[in-house]
Amino acid sequence: MDGPVLRAQGLVKEFRGFRAVDGVDLDVADGSVHALVGPNGAGKTTLFNLLTGFLKPSAGRIRLGDRDLTGRRPEQVARLGVARSFQITSLFAQLTPCEHLQLALAGGTGLTWRFWRSERALDRFSARAAELLDQVGLAAHGHLPAGTLAYGRKRALELALALALDPRVLLLDEPTAGMGVEDIDRTVDLVQRVREGRTVVLVEHNMSVVSRLADRVTVLQNGRVLAEGPYTEIRDDPRVIAAYLGE
Ligand code: ADP
């Protein structure tokens, strides 16, 4: 692990005078898994949306390496190397996982719709799509309509779609939300596998998942950084315990 690959400085997001994110500094070390945690309403989702360009900050700066990401649109942020996992709601029920990935891979090349909608054009991406499906454990499900996949498999497909962009920094928004124990374990294994060669930032409520995955943890409360450090330190910090008890 090196210096910071992703860095936020003095980040503020105001909604009609209310500061959901209130002067956050965040350094995410290259090659690390960095968790954002905190009680409900702490500002995790807002921070996540700022980092991915889905919201524009009211103040502060965001950098990826030596590039300034501040104020850039989500597709520009993704192209520069910060990608978030897709939401299930954006999956197409009729398309197969394989087709989703072929389209994502084709989209990344900037080809026009007219070109990539023809099947032969998409064939160019079938080998890479198969690799990604295999990586997320969906090799046997690549040709079923995505709408028929079980919940955990849909989430795995979202992850594969983000990986199709080959991002330097992968942002995962509650990757285990709504999952049972088996799917949670599978997801932890999966994140361990895909973190190789990249940096992962995740918002996660489940502290067992945080303890297994995160090298560092940033705890937010009322839009501010309450504590930052390795999980074992954070877990025993009286301020963090008090913040969670007050939830
Ligand atoms: P978390 O993800 O940690 O639960 P959020 O980032 O969703 O927290 O929200 C932080 C605070 O900002 C909450 O008080 C929430 O009500 C408020 N908030 C979030 N989005 C908006 C918005 N679009 N307009 C007004 N208030 C918002």
Image: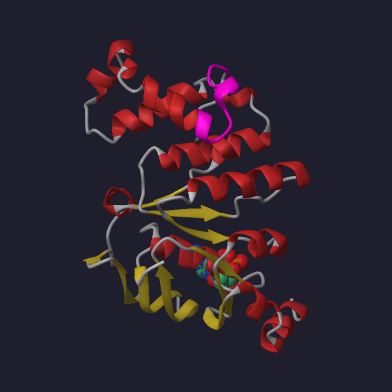
Question: Considering depth in this image, is 132 or 1 the residue closer to the camera?
Answer: 1
- Would residue 246 be found to the left or right of residue 64 on screen? right
The number of discs equals 0
- Horizontal arrangement in the rendering, residue 209 relative to residue 19 (left or right): right
Question: Is residue 100 at least partly visible in the picture?
Answer: no
Residue at x 62% of width, y 46% of height:
189
Image coords of residue 85 (percent x, y):
48, 46
The quadrant in which residue 128 appears is top left
Please name the residue shown 53% across and 21% down the image. 142
Considering every residue shown, the one lying at the far bottom of the view is 238
Q: Is residue 165 left or right of residue 196?
A: left
Magenta residues span: 134-144
Tell me the residue at 44%/60% (across/down).
49
| Observer able to see residue 185 | yes
Query: Residue 107, percent across and down?
Result: 30, 32
**Residue pictured at 46% horizontal, 32% vertical:** 132
Q: Quadrant of residue 4?
A: bottom left
Image: 122 above or below 136: above
- Colouring rule applied to residues: secondary structure
List the single residue furthest toward the front.
1
Residue nearest the observer in this picture, 189 or 179: 189
Q: Quadrant of the C terminus?
A: bottom right
**In the picture provided, is 228 more to the left or to the right than 1?**
right
Picture coordinates of residue 14, whole percent (x, y): 43, 75
Image position of 143 with respect to 205: above or below: above
Point out the image quarter for the N terminus: bottom left
Tell me where residue 92 appears, x and y as whole percent.
50, 28
Magenta-drawn stretch contains 56: no
Q: Quadrant of ligand 1?
A: bottom right
In this orientation, which residue lies closer to the viewer: 169 or 146?
A: 169
